[in-house]
Image (tube, rainbow, N blue to C red):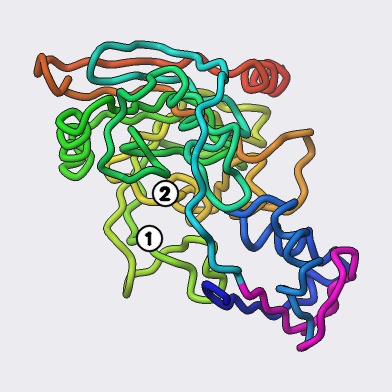
Amino acid sequence: MAEEKIEFTASAEEEGSRLDAFLSRKLSEYSRSFLQKNIKNGCVQVNDKPSKASYKVGNGDHITFEVPALTEPQIEPENIPLDILYEDDDVIVINKPKQMVVHPAPGHYTGTIVNGLMYHCKDSLSGINGVMRPGIVHRIDQDTTGVIVACKNDQAHQCIAQQLKEHSITRKYHAIVLGHLEEDGTVEGKIGRHPIDRKKMALNEKNGKEAVTHYHILDHLNNKYTYVECQLETGRTHQIRVHMASIGHPILGDQVYGPQKCPYHLTGQTLHARTLGFIHPRTKEYMEFEAPLPEYFQKLLKNLQV
């Protein structure tokens, strides 16, 4: 029995893409291997007929994916090295590497931050978000690097979650965006699901939620790119990526909200959660943490500054 039915119509720009690659771009929360398995199992149809992963999509093709109903798996602890910036009895602050998923999801049930936390913290994780997301109070995208906080008990979880709700947490991101930004600024625009592509976010004044991003220029790079710091006033899904793209300056490497082709060998967007600050749930003191720029980001900056 299908959990849901997702439908797409391929555009002229998408013509010639492999079916599995097409779906992987559209359904970024699923791994490509998960999608290939479901294509093989007949869950994906092109123009009402089962197809192969290697099928080349044509302009106007009607593609449906009947997502199989998922049973909640047993999430196993894994001895995964975690870059821990700070830890006490209430919270653990981690520097997340690129391509690491925060919590288990379809196609990503192993190798996540949660799997590593369960091994490291044993039974000391908050349970508010259920067995799939123990300790997780907020997340960053798979290809975004940087600092996140997890909670070891429900009291800490509720405290941090309230700060997120009140927008009192400090969250600063570093990014390289396309184009030459002239001055600092603020982007305000409600963010919600894309009206056509349900796996993307978009400015959506009718159904979206308030979102505010402040950006500050750190450096101009060859007049082609700008190195910026973005501070979140709110925390919507893909907020910085959507907001910067909306003003004509998408993040370098972001193939979802920016150009499909990138002149550099990048894996996803050049976006790094640099700073995270919050009131400690027990001591009530303000604490702030910084995650150093990953090596690939530093090298790219150096090359672009020449």
**Up-down: is 171 above or below 300?**
below
Q: Residues within 10 Å of mark 2 (few under 14, many from 20)?
A: many
Tell me the quarter of the picture where residue 80 sits.
top right
Which quadrant of the rendered structure holds the C terminus?
top right
**What type of secondary structure mainly makes up the magenta span?**
loop
Amino acid type of the residue tagged 2 in the rendering: Gln
Which quadrant of the rendered structure holds the N terminus?
bottom right
Query: What residue is shown at x 71% (from left), y 59% (from top)?
Result: 35
Q: Which residue is mark 1?
A: 191
Question: Who comes first in sequence, dot 1 or dot 2?
Answer: 1
Q: What are the residue bounds of the magenta stretch?
A: 48-66
Query: What residue is shown at x 53% (from left), y 75% (from top)?
Result: 4
Where does the image place residue 125, in percent across and percent down from the top left? 31, 28
Where does the image place residue 95, in percent across and percent down from the top left? 47, 20
Residue at the extreme bottom of the image, as rendered: 48
Q: Give the label on residue 149, or none.
A: none
Element assignment for label 1: strand
Q: How far separated are the C-alphas under marks 1 and 2? A: 7 Å
**Up-down: is 279 above or below 252?**
above
Q: Which residue is mark 2?
A: 239
Decide: marks 1, 2 in contact (CB < 8 A)? Answer: yes
